[in-house]
Image: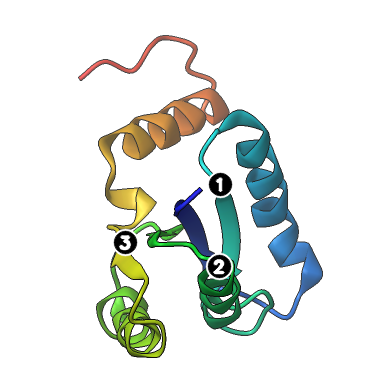
């Protein structure tokens, strides 16, 4: 398949920090027909660079990077776009798109609100 989705997490040298992302990735791979990959911005492997290079070598034509971040802070405004630009130059035959972070999606906000309501002991549906 020519299209792939890369989930981008910040990264940590602590394997326990990475485990929820790896579990989430495994779950998504079972649920989606789209090839989904997990990469880290820094401090962990697979890095964004190694993931893109591997997919480019396999002939991937279109890659979208979905940041698993709540908001677009400095990393998503500066660091990751710089990484993406460098990767575009290194792999010009691959279309590489940086998507908005998951935290900006309305469904994410709804899901998070539901979790918080449940933790607060509220069983009623959160309405808007």
Q: Which mark is residue 55?
A: 2
Quadrant into which the C terminus falls: top left
When asked about the image quadrant of residue 65, the answer is bottom left
* Above or below for 76 versus 36: below
When asked about the image quadrant of residue 79, the answer is bottom left
Q: Which residue is mark 3?
A: 71
* Above or below for 75 versus 1: below
Residue at point 33%, 32% (across, down):
107
* Above or below for 79 versus 99: below
Residue at point 37%, 71% (across, down):
94
Q: Which residue is mark 1?
A: 35
Q: Callout 3: 10 Å neighbours few (<14), some, many (20+)?
A: some
Quick check: 9 left or right of 98? right
Quick check: 75 left or right of 106? right
Residue 103 position, x and y percent, is 35, 50
Which residue is more in the foreground, 120 or 94? 94
Nearest to N terminus: mark 1 or mark 3: 1
Residue 114 position, x and y percent, is 44, 26
From mark 1 to mark 3, how far is it between C-alphas? 24 Å
């Amino acid at each position: 398949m020519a299209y792939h989705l890369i989930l981008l997490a910040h990264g940590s040298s602590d394997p326990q920090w990475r485990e929820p992302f790896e579990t989430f990735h495994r779950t998504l791979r079972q649920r989606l027909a789209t090839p989904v990959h997990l990469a880290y911005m820094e401090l962990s492997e697979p890095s964004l660079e190694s993931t893109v290079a591997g997919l480019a070598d396999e002939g991937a034509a279109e890659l979208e990077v979905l940041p698993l971040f709540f908001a677009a802070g400095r990393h998503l405004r500066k660091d990751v776009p710089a990484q993406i630009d460098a990767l575009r130059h290194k792999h010009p035959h691959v279309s590489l798109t940086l998507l908005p972070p998951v935290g900006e999606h309305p469904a994410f906000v709804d899901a998070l609100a539901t979790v918080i309501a449940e933790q607060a002991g509220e069983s009623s549906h959160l309405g808007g």
